Image: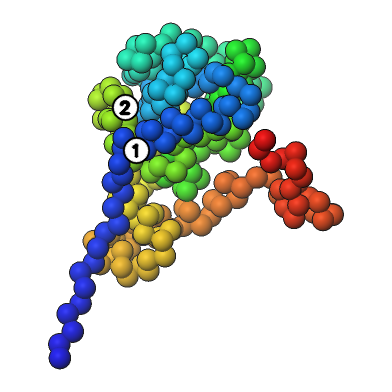
Amino acid sequence: MKLVQAPKLQESLELNWSLVADFLTRFIREELSWRGYEKAIVAVSGGVDSATTLALAVRALGQDRVHALFLPHRDSSPLSRAHAYLVAETFDLALEEVDITPMVEAYAALTPDLTPHRKGNVMARVRMMVLFDKSQAYQALPLGTGNKTERLFGYFTWHGDDTPPVNPLGDLYKTQVWALARFLGVPEAVVEKPPTADLVPGQTDEADLGVRYLRADVILEHYLKGYPDSYLLALGFTSEEVQRVKERVNRTHWKRALPTVALLSSTGIGEFYLRPLDYRP
């Protein structure tokens, strides 16, 4: 009897976007509520992730309870500003602009050996400093905008853009964010443009990562579910792509973890024992 080998099936990243949007809308409302907030604030970059987060916030809370903040540096792309204002206009929001150039350049002037990469990290952290100050001023909770692909790759500034306490997109791959963005009405010009952190002129995400999101996301989904490399190779991915994705995930676990605390007791916060006051009411 001849055995017929089953065809290789690719895990689908397609979701019910109406259901996802409804779930994330409720998620934002509930997360703000138990923290005692009625308003949210989003740092809008002109990219698809922050635009999608802003769209969800407006859907959840209404325009009058969402603050949109644009934080450019003199090296930021003019397209980022144009798209940030386009997104704000699309969702009928005023966009507050705070130029971070003086803050970043003041530090750069004191640091002659500052590399472009380090300066980019300074920019990301200064943006969070402003975001959290505006959060206190407006009593509005900051919403994070990082997607699952970037989080798994460690492709974010530590204690920078990963800092906000609530992140509606953190379990959606980049390609899924694109699909959700279209469902929510994010302008096509924002969805279609090449993703970039816009920290260094000419920088793009896919050039930094060395693999396209459309391929990386499928590899990630299979890898996280325990498929062997041979299965991925049979789907048409190259050995280089598979290894690049796995290496980025495996060497950045520490960036996705809370601070490591030296345990001296059986009541370590969030470790062996969780105090009742740390539970949600």
| Relative height, residue 15 to residue 165 (above, below) | below
| Relative height, residue 137 to residue 123 (above, below) | above
Mark 2 residue type = Leu
Q: Residue at x 20, y 77 (%)?
A: 5
Which class describes the residues within 10 Å of circle 2: few (<14), some (14-19), or many (20+)? some
Q: Position of residue 279 (x, y in %)?
A: 69, 41
| Relative height, residue 56 to residue 207 (above, below) | above
Under circle 1, the secondary element is helix
| Relative height, residue 238 to residue 168 (above, below) | below
Can residue 141 be seen? yes
Q: Residue at x 28, y 53 (%)?
A: 12
Q: Residue at x 48, y 54 (%)?
A: 249
Mark 1 residue type = Leu
Mark number, residue 19: 1
Q: Which residue is mark 2?
A: 184
Q: Is residue 260 left or right of residue 150?
A: right
> How far is mark 2 from mark 1, CA to CA?
12 Å
Q: Position of residue 91 (x, y in %)?
A: 36, 15
Quarter of the figure with the C terminus: top right
Q: Residue at x 41, y 26 (%)?
A: 56
Q: Residue 200 versus residue 123: which sits nearer the camera?
A: 123
Q: Toward which corner of the image does residue 186 lie, by quadrant? A: top left
Q: Position of residue 167 (x, y in %)?
A: 51, 34
Mark positioned earlier in the residue sequence (2 or 1): 1
Under circle 2, the secondary element is helix
Q: Position of residue 236 (x, y in %)?
A: 23, 61
Q: Toward which corner of the image does residue 196 lie, by quadrant? A: top left
Q: How is the image coloured?
A: rainbow
Mark number, residue 241: none
Q: Does the CB distance between marks 2 and 1 fall below 8 Å? A: no
